[in-house]
Image (cartoon, rainbow, N blue to C red):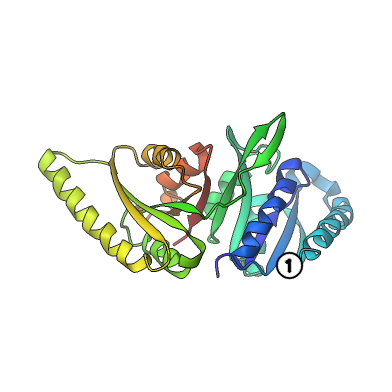
Amino acid sequence: MLFDKILISMDFSEESRLLLNCLEEFKLLGLKEVILAHVVDIRAAGGNASSFVAPNQKKLQEIKKEIENSQVRCKTVVQIGFPAEEIDSIARQQNASLILIGSHGRGFIKSFFLGSTAFDLLRITQTPLLVERFREQKGKLKPYCRYKFAKVLAATDFSQCASKLVETMEAHQKSFQEILLMHVIERAYSKQEFDKLKADAQAILDEIKDSISKKAEVYTRIKAGDAAKNIIETAQKEEATLIMLTKKGRGGTKEYLLGSTARDVALRSTQNAVLIIPC
């Protein structure tokens, strides 16, 4: 199950602590275990890296008690290395079903991962990744954690990889109240070609709708132009609580492992949490 075993990367900043506020919602979706992971960045700690392990493990143990008091199992892991690689490795070793990370409206929180770690994790991990949003309220950060799965915008490009998105929605229909299925036509060389692409896309969306509409209300949208821009704008206009899309688009080379649309939505969306499903 997508939400039963969640890995949260902790760096003991305000942002990573706020991610714990999201757990109440995940409990309603079947959360059984949390993995609290901390990575001592070898680039910053250098030869003193090992000296940070014990005190940081102690900090994780204190947070673990808080989580276990809410009747959720919890495990702690401290590693030394490059954060993105270690987080991905821990997720695989622990069979995590989801990685939860945080993002601010201006981009990934610099204090959450050093340098380009957040982007690297987006690029390399094969574990579903949920990028949570934060907002400022009276000078303090607040996460957009409540009711993420009430109204989901699911963007598909009809690639083979995108079938994983459909599988996820089918498997978790009870978790979603409303689903907005969306496809963006990025190019057409004539109105005739565009009309055909639109008709074909609508037929596919209707077919997907029929397969996932047993528990949730499902709607469809077709847009034209830049995919990421349309996805973000539609999510805001429709007041979606979450954007879902797959990690790889039609390109199959290693350079496009993440996919430009997934990358741009994750980096540019400021108001919606983004759930990225790998192929």
Within the image, what quadrant is residue 114 found in?
top right
Above/below status of 75 relative to 138: below
Q: Residue furthest top?
A: 139
In the image, residue 207 above or below residue 56: below
Above or below, comparing residue 12 to residue 168 in the picture:
above
Q: Residue at x 19, y 41 (%)?
A: 188
- Residue at the spot 42% in from the left edge and 67% down from the top edge: 215
The C terminus appears in which quarter of the rendering? bottom left
Instruction: Pick whichever, 263 or 206, lies toward us.
Output: 206
Q: Which residue is mark 1?
A: 72
Please state the horizontal and vertical placement of residue 118, each as a whole percent of the image.
Answer: 60, 45
Q: Position of residue 11 (x, y in %)?
A: 75, 47
The answer to whether residue 188 is left or right of residue 213 is left
Drawn side of residue 100 relative to residue 192, left or right = right
Instruction: Please state which amino acid type lies under the numbered disc 1.
Output: Val
SS class, disc 1: loop
Which residue is pictured at 23% across the width and 53% down the height? Answer: 201
Tally the numbered discs. 1
Judge whether residue 82 can be spotted in this image.
Answer: no
Furthest residue in direction left, as rendered: 192
Measured from the top left, where is residue 220 in percent x and y? 31, 52
